[in-house]
Image (tube, rainbow, N blue to C red):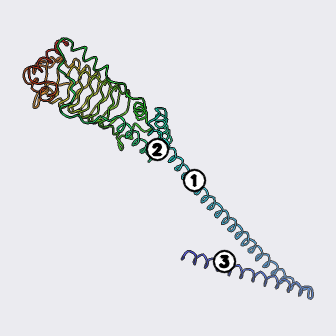
Amino acid sequence: MRETEEKKDKNKLKLIGLTVLATVLLVSVVAAVWNWVDLQKKPLEGTKRQFDASLDFVKTIATIAGGVVLFLNFRVANRSAELAQKKLEQETEKAKADAKLAEARLTMERFSKAVDMMSSDKSIHLRLGGIYALESIALDSSDDKIDENYRQVLEVLTAFVRQNSPYPLRKQVEKESTISSQPIEQPTAEVGEQHDEIPSLPTDIQAALTVLSRRKHKDTDWEHYPIDLHKTDLRRANLQGANLQKVDLVESNLQLADLKGAELQGAQLEKADLTSAILHLADLSGANLRKAELSGANLQETHLIKTKLQGANLIEADLQRADLHEANLQEALLLCTDLQNAQNLTQQQLEGEKLPLLCNVALPEGLTVSSNRDCDQRLLEALVERYPEAFENLISARFVVDQIRQKKKW
């Protein structure tokens, strides 16, 4: 309101100034004409000088008036240009807003259609199409930051895996053990048969995992939106080289999964089943693997720096050249575990409170700890306590331990 009044006052002053200038010019012209008439009547020297002075004054006033007119024309033209530019900017902003709104509506339609396709129970092809449609939406998201569309795609894909490939908590009486009391005549054959019976991961679940593995902002999104795949059945999953930093895989089943070269720094894998999984060259620095099942796992050259391995089952696991710098091995089960050439494994990690249980372990040179320190009752009691469904008593535990030891002669 105040700006409008000030503008009116300025316009009023301009009008007054122009009126005064026009009046002066008119009076000057009249005076000049008057002097010219007088000069015609009295062609004297004084009359001529007076006429010339009047004519010069008229020229001066006319020049000033012309300059003022030109200045005003320039101001008007400049103001018109400013208004045109402002209008153009407003129209451009409106066009951008309309385009953004149209794009948002199109993305919403694509998103809804993709979710509908993934919900299909009739066709695997529809579900795959929906998964890859979501990937396309994520790829079309902002290059500079993680926007809402990208975040929603991650949430839908992880929810799809959790919903369609769940791994429910096992009751204590039904809990499977990676160490089972096999009949003495064919223990190895039965273990092989168990692995053969594990089915391949469903195609649509593997597709969702593949999309998650190659997601657009995989190097940074984990800082704000870690992947949630807890309590999922991912047996035989192919996650080679996947960036799954800080992923939540608590109590998930990853038996025989291929995680070679995967980035799993800070991952939550507590009580996860990684029996016979391939973790060669994977980075598990700072990961939580408390009470995880890692029996028979390939952990060669794996980064286990500051990894939490308390109570982990590392029976027959291969940790050759693995980096165990400051890894916590308290109460871990190390039966026939291959630690030859393991890097940065110290005496202190195998001693102190809550000792790891060592039996027929291949240790790196330079350590004075006995590789058979706990083959006696301590290991047997730990097995019976942890796997009561597999071992009825210490005798059955001793039987299985002896069988495993016979297979590994360092």
Mark with earlier residue (1, 2): 1
Mark with earlier residue (3, 2): 3
Q: Quadrant of the C terminus?
A: top left
Mark nearer the viewer, 1 or 3: 1
Amino acid identity at mark 2: Asp
Q: Which residue is mark 1?
A: 96
How far across and how far down the image is residue 370, in percent? 11, 18
Q: Quadrant of the N terminus?
A: bottom right
Mark nearer the viewer, 1 or 2: 1
Q: Is residue 98 left or right of residue 292?
A: right
Task: Check if mark 3's residue and mark 2's residue have beta carbons within 8 Å.
Answer: no
How far across and how far down the image is residue 286, in percent? 26, 34
Q: Tag 2: Cα neighbours inside 10 Å, few (<14), some, or many (≥20)? A: few
Amino acid identity at mark 3: Lys
Figure quadrant of residue 239: top left
Q: Is residue 14 left or right of residue 352?
A: right
Mark nearer the viewer, 3 or 2: 2
Q: Secondary structure at mark 2?
A: loop
Spatial CA span between label 1 and label 3: 39 Å
How far across and how far down the image is residue 44, in percent? 90, 86
Above or below, 202 against 370 in this view is: below
Q: Tag 3: Cα neighbours inside 10 Å, few (<14), some, or many (≥20)? A: few
Q: Which residue is mark 3?
A: 14
Q: Which residue is mark 2?
A: 144
Above or below, 133 against 397 in this view is: below
Amino acid identity at mark 1: Lys
Spatial CA span between label 1 and label 2: 19 Å
Task: Check if mark 1's residue and mark 2's residue have beta carbons within 8 Å.
Answer: no
Q: Nearer the viewer, residue 212 or 392?
A: 392
Q: Secondary structure at mark 1?
A: helix
Q: Nearer the viewer, residue 83 or 62?
A: 83
